[in-house]
Image (tube, rainbow, N blue to C red):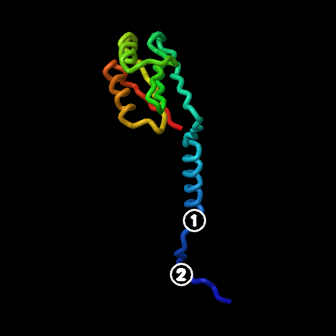
Amino acid sequence: MRFRSEDEENFSFDLTPLVDVVFLLLIFFMVSTVFVDFKRQMDISLPSSKSSVPSEVKEPVKVELTVDKQIFLNGEKVTLEEFELALSKISVSKNNAAVIRADKDLPYGNVIKIMGILQSAKILDIGVAVK
């Protein structure tokens, strides 16, 4: 029978604390991950706040562009000139937002033109709905 001498040292690592830390990190990242459910059309609703000025929270301007270059502003068909006039009538505030729903086959330049018109109307919070 061989007895260990006190001079021998054990050089192996104890992996138990390492495994514990890895599992804690895994659980942390799983809990902090945001799961997004993409729908056919993205429903965007502005968050509500309990601030003292609730009148500043407005519904976003909805712009839809079809593949045959038709423009719909809040569900109503408009031409490009009517679109600019309608945006100029919308009251300008810092909380104005717009959501663009454009057909995927529509040329990129048409969407950029609409975004430029929105920016010239002082609507800087512009979102593009995707699938």
Residue 34 occupies quadrant: top right
Where does residue 113 sit, x and y in percent of width and height? 34, 29
Q: In the shown orientation, is residue 127 left or right of residue 35?
A: left
Q: Give the class, few, some or many, for how many residues have Cα within 10 Å of label 2's Cα (few <14, many ≥20).
A: few
- Left or right of 64? Residue 83 is left
- Left or right of 21? Residue 1 is right
Which residue is at a point 48% across and 26% down the rendered structure image? 64
Residue 71 position within the rendered picture, expressed as x and y whole percent measured from the top left: 45, 23
Q: Are marks 2 and 1 in contact (CB under 8 Å)?
A: no
Residue with the mark numbered 1: 15
Q: What is the secondary structure assignment of the residue under circle 1?
A: loop
How far across and how far down the image is residue 25, in percent? 54, 51
Q: Name the front one of labels 2 and 1.
A: 1
What residue sits 40% from the left and 37% below the top? 107
Residue 124 is marked as: none
Looking at the rendered image, the quarter that the N terminus falls into is bottom right
C-alpha distance separating marks 2 and 1: 21 Å
Residue bearing the label numbered 2:
8
Left/right placement of residue 46 relative to residue 114 reads right
The residue under label 2 is which amino acid type?
Glu
